[in-house]
């Protein structure tokens, strides 16, 4: 990861798009111009007693407007404070952070077959940036999006439809099929050259196993609690097959080496 910046960003829009889910557009020419799908930013609260920023995945960017979109769930005091920000407020942010997706690598792995993105819950937003970028770079590609929700209170699915086919899974069966995203992939007969996923760890374990069973290349974007967000504190490590040159053990730093990993490189 290179080129991270700490900047003061003006908030252009911020408001709810589903129960407890908010969408925020921030003005940052620097970050918008350099961010890749799969990366994240750290955003600071205005509360001086809260020294550590909150990491939030980048949902999408608009380089022409110089803006960055975050879609986040209000789950604690920090994100509650973010939800109160209004238009023209400012927020201190650091980014872009982490390593995102390499589009040419995904296209090569797909071998002319479909890219399937899988998002569960708050793991859905970063997948939007991926399908948008992939569509812009490979306009003729087949792209599927498998989205898992708790119920029919969906978010971002209409945005996904601009770039991909959309398939639903829900816990209560109120939209799509009743079950998880793996159930949806099997139910709808979705065939893929490569799969990219972000969501809860049990879901990612399922994607990794499915990829192994079907000989499908898969990538996972990990969600971990982070402190520094730049790889210094080792608070967000995951187990890997290879020895990390920084820690000299079988660990990788999710914030710096990830959050995107090829699924066969890590243990879930």
Image: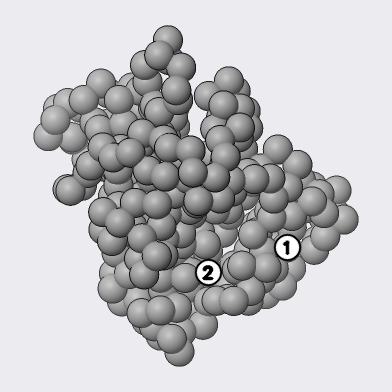
Residue farthest toward the top in the current orientation of the protein: 49
**Residue drawn at x 47%, y 70% as measured from the top left:** 132
- Check disc 2: other Cα within 10 Å, few if <14, some if 14-19, many if 20+: many
Q: Is residue 1 above or below residue 189?
A: above
Q: Position of residue 148 (x, y in %)?
A: 68, 53
The colour scheme used to paint the residues is: one colour
SS label for mark 2: strand
**Could you say which disc has been placed on residue 168 in the image?**
1
Please give the label number shown on residue 116. Answer: 2
Q: In the drawing, what numbered circle is on residue 215?
A: none
Q: Secondary structure at mark 1?
A: strand
Q: Say if 141 sits above or below 84 in the image.
A: below
Residue 237: percent from the left, percent from the top?
A: 33, 29
> Furthest residue to the bottom?
140
Residue 58 visible, this orientation: no
206 or 228: nearer the viewer:
228
* Residue visible at 55% across and 76% down in the picture: 163
Q: Nearer the viewer, residue 180 or 170?
A: 170
Per the model, the C-alpha gap separating discs 1 and 2 is 13 Å
Q: Is residue 161 left or right of residue 253?
A: right
Relative to residue 239, is residue 28 depicted above or below? below
- Near mark 1 (Cα within 10 A), the count class, few <14, some 14-19 or many ≥20, is many
Q: Tell me: residue 150, above or below residue 190.
A: above
């Amino acid at each position: 990861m290179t080129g991270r910046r700490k900047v003061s960003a003006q908030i252009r829009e911020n408001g709810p798009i589903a129960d407890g889910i908010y969408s925020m557009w921030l003005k940052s020419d620097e970050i918008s111009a350099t961010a890749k799908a799969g990366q994240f930013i750290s955003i600071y609260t205005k509360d001086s007693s809260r020294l550590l920023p909150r990491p939030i995945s980048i949902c999408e960017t608009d380089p022409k407007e110089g803006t960055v979109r975050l879609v986040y769930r209000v789950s604690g005091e920090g994100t509650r404070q973010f939800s109160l920000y209004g238009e023209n407020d400012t927020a201190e942010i650091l980014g872009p952070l982490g390593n995102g997706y390499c589009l040419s690598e995904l296209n090569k792995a797909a071998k002319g077959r479909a890219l399937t993105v899988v998002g569960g819950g708050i793991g859905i937003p970063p997948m939007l940036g991926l399908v948008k970028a992939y569509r812009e770079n490979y306009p003729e590609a087949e792209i599927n999006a498998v989205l898992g929700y708790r119920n029919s209170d969906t978010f971002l699915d209409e945005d996904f439809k601009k770039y991909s086919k959309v398939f639903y899974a829900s816990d209560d069966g109120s939209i799509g099929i009743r079950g998880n995203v793996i159930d949806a992939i099997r139910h709808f007969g979705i065939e893929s050259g490569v799969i990219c996923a972000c969501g809860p760890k049990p879901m990612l374990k399922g994607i990794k196993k499915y990829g192994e069973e079907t000989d499908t290349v898969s990538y996972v974007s990990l969600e971990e609690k982070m402190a520094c967000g730049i790889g210094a504190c080792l608070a967000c490590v995951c187990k890997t097959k290879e020895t990390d040159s920084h820690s000299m053990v079988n660990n990788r730093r999710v914030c710096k080496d990830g959050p995107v990993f090829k699924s066969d490189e890590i243990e879930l």
